[in-house]
Image: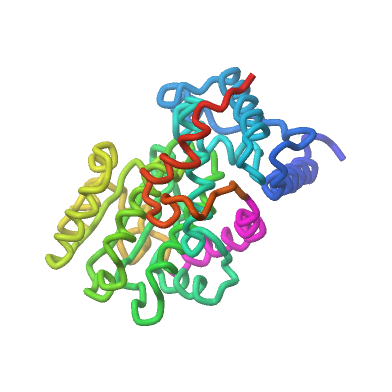
Amino acid sequence: MYKNSFPFKLMQLINLERLMLAAALNMNKAPESYDSYAFNLPDKFKLVAQDELREEDDIRENALKQVREWIAKHPLIKKCRTDAPFLLRFLRTKKFSIPAATEMLEKYLSIRQIYPNWFHKLDINDADLEAIIDSGYLFALPERDERGRKIVFSSAGKFDTNRFTAAQLIRIHSIVVEALLDEEESQIAGYVHVIDDSELSMGFLGIWSFADIKNLAHCVQNSLPMRQKENHFVSLPPFANKLSEFILSVLSDKLKNRVFVHKNMDELKTKINPKLLPKEYGGTVPMADCIAQFKELLKSKRDQLVALDEMQIEINKNSPYWADSTDADIAAGVIGSFRKLEVD
């Protein structure tokens, strides 16, 4: 078989995907060997990585080595992915600052255990989760924008509050996020979130407690390695204004500056290319097709998503930060104790 032939290249791609999946399923925190890494994205992503993230080949290689050594030595981390796509989530989010990236990784592992009803069992075969995806409440759009950013689309009114809970809603967001986080284009270029609130109901607000909102905000901005570049809320009804004010009050200034509120879809389209939206909103691909394509992605990643539950960091359930597990509590407990863990 010729090396430049299509069948040969296809076989190479399939073998590479198998190796990546095997690495993603391996939770041994100190394996005998690590997967090799090569930057294979188009030049435009390489330029963004260099300009915005200070990423160079030697910096990336050294950072991966240091984080892997740090994980292997960490006395409380019992199981953890160490493959390059997973670790680059944190390194790129924190612009290759080793202390900041490892701190975020600790928090990420911790919140997954503190809030298992939010972050575990991310299984598209779960009938309820699949029904929420099918409803059109939340999914990623097929095409990236001109900056290479993945667009996540949500229609808040399609979430059935009579059937589903706030915990299930967060799990849907978790499964969508986790399915996308290993995509290197998104790690570098970031994400855009578009939320159609035109059919938002009082019932949607009624399923939340203020404690849930506050804890979730802490998780999102301090523990999840996701480069949120823009959040667009469209047609927010008047009764939701107080809630939006509360949400903004618990966000960092950085995230506040990335939140945009639009009166209608026409106003949104001055910021987002309408061709990228579902056909029902002015794009070219029907929403049903967008959802079907995204479900195929979730199914292809099912084993990888379910395996995340095997990761483990030791936490003392008698500690105060477990009972009142805000970000500050986490930082004061297991996180603060090992921030200065040294790497030779």
Horizontal relation, residue 141 to residue 263: left or right? right
Horizontal relation, residue 85 to residue 235: left or right? right
User: Is 95 in the magenta?
Assistant: no
243 or 78, which is in the foreground? 78
Quadrant the N terminus occupies: top right
- Which percent across, then down, holds residue 185? 50, 39
| Residue 175 in view, yes or no | no
Q: How many numbered markers are drawn?
A: 0
Quadrant the C terminus occupies: top right
- Which percent across, then down, holds residue 296? 58, 63
Q: How is the image coloured?
A: rainbow
User: Which residue lies at the image location 46% right of the left edge and 42% below the top edge?
Assistant: 333
- Which percent across, then down, holds residue 217? 33, 51
Spot the residue most to the left: 238
Spot the residue most to the bottom: 162
User: Which residue lies at the image location 46% right of the left edge and 24% below the top edge?
Assistant: 47
User: Which residue lies at the image location 40% right of the left edge and 69% below the top edge?
Assistant: 136
Q: Main secondary structure of the magenta part?
A: helix
Reply above or below: 45 against 312: above
- Which percent across, then down, holds residue 300? 64, 59
User: Which residue lies at the image location 30% right of the left edge and 71% below the top edge?
Assistant: 157
Residues drawn in magenta: 288-311
196 or 89, which is in the foreground? 89
96 or 102, which is in the foreground? 102
User: Is 301 in the magenta?
Assistant: yes
Horizontal relation, residue 38 to residue 214: left or right? right
| Residue 1 in view, yes or no | yes
